[in-house]
Image (tube, rainbow, N blue to C red):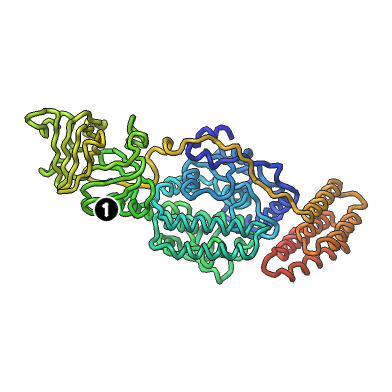
Amino acid sequence: MQATRERIPAHLRPFVVEQDYGAYDEIDQAVWRFILLQTYARLSATAHPAYADGLGQTGIGVQRIPHVEEMDASLAEFGWGAVAVDGFIPPRAFQEFQALGVMTIAAEIRRAEHLAYTPAPDIVHESAGHAPIIPDETYRRFLQRFGAIGARAFSSPADGRVYAAVHQLSALKEDANATPEAVALAQHMLLDAQNSVTFLSEAASLSRLHWWTVEYGLVGTPDDYRLYGAGLLSSLGESHFCHAPRVSKYRLDASCLEMPYDITKSQPQLFVAEDFNHLNDVLSEVESKLAQCKGGGAALDAMLASKELGTIEFGTGLQVSGVLARVCGGYEQPAYLQLSGPCALAVGGRNLEGHGPEGHPEGYGTPVGRLEDGTALSTLAATDLARFASSADARRLRLRFASGVEVEGRFLATRCGDAGRLQLIRFEDATVTRGDERLFEPAWGVYDMAVGEAVWSAFAGPADAEPYAASEYPAILAPLRQPRVQDDALVIDFYREALRLWENPEAPDLVTRFGFLGESLRENFPDDWLLRWNLLECLCKVGRGASVAATLRGELLAIEKRNPDELPISMGLRYLDEKYP
């Protein structure tokens, strides 16, 4: 994993943790194994052809929870890697990891009570769901391209509230100690957050595309399709019920952005791509409408509405990062852009020396557009500035813009691009005005004026992320498992006894000992189904103990009858009937 860690930028390192493999107990391993046995048996026929071989190619086995280090080593063959994370990470960070070709594997694993589906991220979904299709070259290129685009999409303050509420509700639903009142309150908070959304941000639009493709995508035709979405590949329930006629299937196109989704419920409709190239076509259509591609007034509008740190890029290649606070003169023909907070000036994604956040700690402003006489400053060289000099002082310049902005000050220096054309002009003793409004005062220090007639692009996040959040890897282990309560601890003892007995499946007393374990379960844990299923599976494998097997099967059906909508018992029994007829 060292090679993968070396290429993760500093600002993403705080999300990476160490997988504590010893934290998984026998129940956790049984949960993994049950899910993978069922899904592999079904998905080998219904998933994209890459799935069947993709598990092994990416370091995932059916019998045990994967080691993230082993996954990382396997993914290296495809130019990817894997790191462990502690549950939810912010959407933009997730997209940045994806753009880098790094899978983020949530180290937690769902509880047996939520074995069929959990809304919280867990190692089943993040590994067995996302990894198996990575060996397909077209698909993994799509993922990285999606990540690069998604990382630059503007969100909104309401998006942050919805994300936090979904995070809270998902965590509570997976918390064995959460009270019904706490879950109900979290659901109410999510509803309030969703109701606070007044417009669909770029990031929210892309999250819908991600949901209907990467998470719940089908490939083929609406009548003949295969599964490739991670949410389908990792869910016992949805990988089965998605085939039901009540789940509508539509050809994938950009209109899927109009379809919201609920992370806590089964999906009422799904979208089908013709192939993985089709995914890239739809992504290109969506990308063309984003601020990072359109530029101009639409880009400024998206950045201002987001109220988040973003970057404006001019045609000269100069990039200005900060929080856009004001657009003087209107979006279509902006006269002056004012950014707040620590700002930075960059070219090619790297801050210019002396122009990082420390160089502009209290904001930044610059005029936009052509000069009053129609001149485009971006077409001039540094020596051309002499024409704007005062007759009394050759270093004192006055620039009058068509927008009404006027910059006057003593010229200090310029920065020019590769073609020798102006990108940045530095003044001292500068005054910037627009009519009666004073936009910059000499007392505020040196004035650095960006050169650019139009906004070519705007995107979320800084051009150069490192100075904003440099950090090292945290010393955190995950999963952070709560100690099993007394009853669970006893169940684990039963699991260990069953595993010890299974080490010698030909032993003459195996059936008798399994019978004793079954009696102990009846006496102490009448509703525990997963160990009963494992005992039944073992008996089916050896083809012995028909009476004990029949008792276990009857008890499993009785448990399911008491919990008809929650447990995948019938599914597990069908698997055994098909595997051991």
246 to the left or right of 364: right
The answer to whether residue 8 is seen in the rendering is yes
Q: Position of residue 170 (x, y in %)?
A: 58, 58
Q: Secondary structure at mark 1?
A: helix
Judge the density around disc 1: few (<14), some (14-19), many (≥20) Cα neighbours within 10 Å. many
Q: Position of residue 449 (x, y in %)?
A: 23, 37
Q: Quadrant of the C terminus?
A: bottom right
Q: Position of residue 322 (x, y in %)?
A: 35, 43
**Closer to us: 324 or 211:** 324
446 to the left or right of 23: left
Q: Which residue is mark 1?
A: 297
Amino acid residing under circle 1: Gly
221 to the left or right of 372: right
Q: Residue at x 69, y 60 (%)?
A: 113
Residue 466, by quadrant, is top left
**Closer to us: 66 or 198:** 198
Q: Quadrant of the N terminus?
A: top right
Q: Residue at x 22, y 29 (%)?
A: 413
